[in-house]
């Protein structure tokens, strides 16, 4: 089996402008853009859940509303709901590639907000989130063999309180993945040839329904969501952006056709732009950058765990002793921030059950207010002043901070998670305890999914932290 580190491999050649402020706008075309060929789903969001290709409508949480969009009205995500589910598990997407594109107007571009995500209710497939830095677009093109393929933009690409056109494309023949913002390529990388995990999974907007980081949400408006069975060209993406408020033409052009939704377990009859069939999940694993092979690559010897990480910065001002406030764990560059969120929440729950006096991230969030600026303080990394404010809000005498420094996945067999955990005295920043934890799951001999392995590794890290805290106290 092939071992794949979850670390980010590098953006490769990045084109376009790096910062949102550097985009100077467009000379908007007055006519609508021809709807590109290969469209397999289109949800305009004009005050209704209607879909225009297969006529299978979106499924919305009842708290979802609609607001002013780029083209008519848009889905309005307020951060306190379960998002929108697009039932496209039976669509012919991914055999030759795919595109998902929409207009976004986010209220918050801090790391950790899902935008698009294929998910089957147990685990995730291809997904796109905001990531490590404000305004950074990040995507994981998970393949059907459970291997992650990462691509990300520079920071500052996505801005708040304005509509921007965003697209994610992957062309299987060339292996090239791209992220676009306002018609410009902001990330471009050869990820290798593989079958992306889209088939058999529904597409979720603004929400992760299952897997590590379950419950993370997008806040803002999303409009004109469209999915294609191929990678659109830069010219096609630019055409959609330039059309602006005129949108895509609703009269079928360029191979778009209305089709009857397929029966369960079958693909639709052939229609213009809608081919029959696609390879199912579970196709032979294709390792990154190579041709397909049904023989798994032998798993190399695991590389050594990284050296001791840099200590977390200390705080400055004293605060009275009291409960322990558990903050979100940060993660090393290239690791999924949802993993840090999962560890901190699991740790807080475990410590409470063990009779520690704990203030959870949710309690801290309720204490500091619901406005975007206040909630942004809950995301790592935490400055000294931020630590003081959050601890004081819940009367905590100390804070528990953590950092996930490395993750190793031996696909289907085992997972290793390395973390650093520090307990700091609120106010003074004095380090009360520091724990360096490395946990590896037992070998499952190919019987476990990557999500199951990571969840088991998280539980082991949490259990080790509990033991260490008990000994220290």
Image: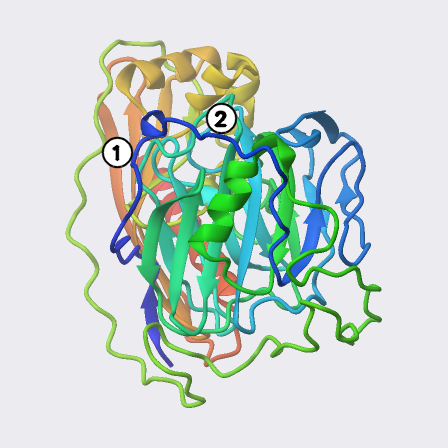
Residue 93 shows in this picture: yes
Query: What colouring method underlies this structural image?
Result: rainbow
Determine which quarter of the picture holds residue 466.
top left
Q: Position of residue 86 (x, y in %)?
A: 71, 51
- Earlier along the polypeptide chain: callout 1 or callout 2? 2
Other-residue count near label 1 (Cα within 10 Å), few / some / many at <14 / 14–19 / ≥20:
some
Circle 1 sits on which residue?
A: 433
Q: Residue at x 51, y 37 (%)?
A: 242
Circle 2 sits on which residue?
A: 108
Tell me the element at label 1.
strand
Of the pair 73 and 410, the residue shown nearer to us: 73
Of the pair 177 and 413, the residue shown nearer to us: 177
Q: Give left or right: position of 177 versus 154.
A: right
Determine which quarter of the picture holds residue 205.
top right
Of the pair 350 and 250, the residue shown nearer to us: 250
Q: Residue at x 57, y 16 (%)?
A: 370
Of the pair 94 and 24, the residue shown nearer to us: 24
Give the residue furthest to the bottom.
Answer: 295
Q: Position of residue 2 (x, y in %)?
A: 35, 77
Q: Residue at x 47, y 45 (%)?
A: 238
């Amino acid at each position: 089996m092939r071992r794949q580190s979850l670390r980010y491999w590098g953006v490769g050649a990045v084109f376009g402008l790096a910062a949102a402020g550097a985009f100077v706008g467009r000379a908007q075309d007055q006519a609508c853009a021809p709807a590109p060929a290969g469209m397999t789903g289109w949800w305009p969001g004009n005050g209704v859940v209607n879909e225009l290709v297969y006529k299978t409508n979106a499924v919305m949480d009842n708290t979802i509303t609609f607001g002013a969009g780029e083209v008519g009205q848009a889905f309005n995500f307020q951060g306190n709901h379960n998002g929108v589910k697009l039932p496209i598990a039976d669509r012919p997407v991914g055999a030759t590639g795919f595109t998902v594109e929409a207009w976004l107007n986010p209220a918050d571009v801090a790391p950790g907000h899902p935008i698009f995500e294929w998910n089957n209710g147990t685990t995730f497939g291809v997904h796109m989130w905001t990531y490590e830095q404000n305004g950074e677009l990040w995507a994981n093109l998970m393949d059907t063999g459970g291997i992650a393929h990462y691509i990300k933009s520079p920071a500052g690409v996505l801005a708040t309180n304005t509509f921007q056109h965003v697209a994610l494309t992957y062309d299987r023949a060339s292996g090239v993945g791209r992220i676009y913002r306002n018609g410009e390529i902001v990330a471009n990388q050869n990820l290798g040839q593989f079958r992306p995990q889209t088939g058999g999974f529904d597409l979720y907007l603004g929400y992760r329904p299952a897997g590590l980081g379950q419950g993370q949400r997008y806040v803002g408006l999303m409009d004109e969501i469209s999915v294609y069975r191929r990678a659109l060209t830069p010219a096609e993406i630019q055409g959609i952006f330039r059309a602006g408020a005129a949108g895509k033409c609703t009269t079928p052009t360029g191979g778009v056709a209305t089709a009857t939704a397929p029966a369960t377990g079958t693909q639709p009859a052939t229609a213009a732009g809608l081919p029959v069939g696609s390879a199912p999940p579970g196709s032979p694993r294709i390792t990154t950058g190579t041709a397909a092979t049904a023989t798994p690559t032998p798993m190399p010897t695991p590389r050594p765990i990284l050296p001791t990480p840099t200590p977390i910065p200390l705080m400055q001002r004293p605060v009275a002793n009291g409960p322990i406030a558990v903050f979100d764990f940060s993660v090393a560059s290239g690791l999924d921030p949802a993993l840090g969120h999962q560890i901190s929440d699991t740790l807080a729950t475990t410590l409470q059950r063990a009779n520690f006096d704990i203030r959870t991230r949710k309690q801290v969030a309720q204490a500091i207010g619901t406005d975007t600026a206040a909630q942004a303080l809950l995301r790592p990394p935490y400055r000294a002043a931020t630590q003081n404010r959050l601890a004081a809000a819940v009367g905590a005498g100390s804070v528990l901070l953590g950092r996930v420094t490395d993750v190793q996945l031996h696909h289907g067999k085992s997972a290793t998670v390395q973390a650093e955990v520090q307990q700091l005295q609120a106010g003074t920043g004095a380090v009360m305890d520091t724990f360096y934890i490395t946990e590896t799951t037992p070998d499952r001999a190919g019987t476990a999914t990557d999500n199951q392995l990571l969840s088991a590794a998280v539980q082991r890290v949490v259990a080790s932290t509990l033991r260490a805290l008990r000994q220290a106290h």
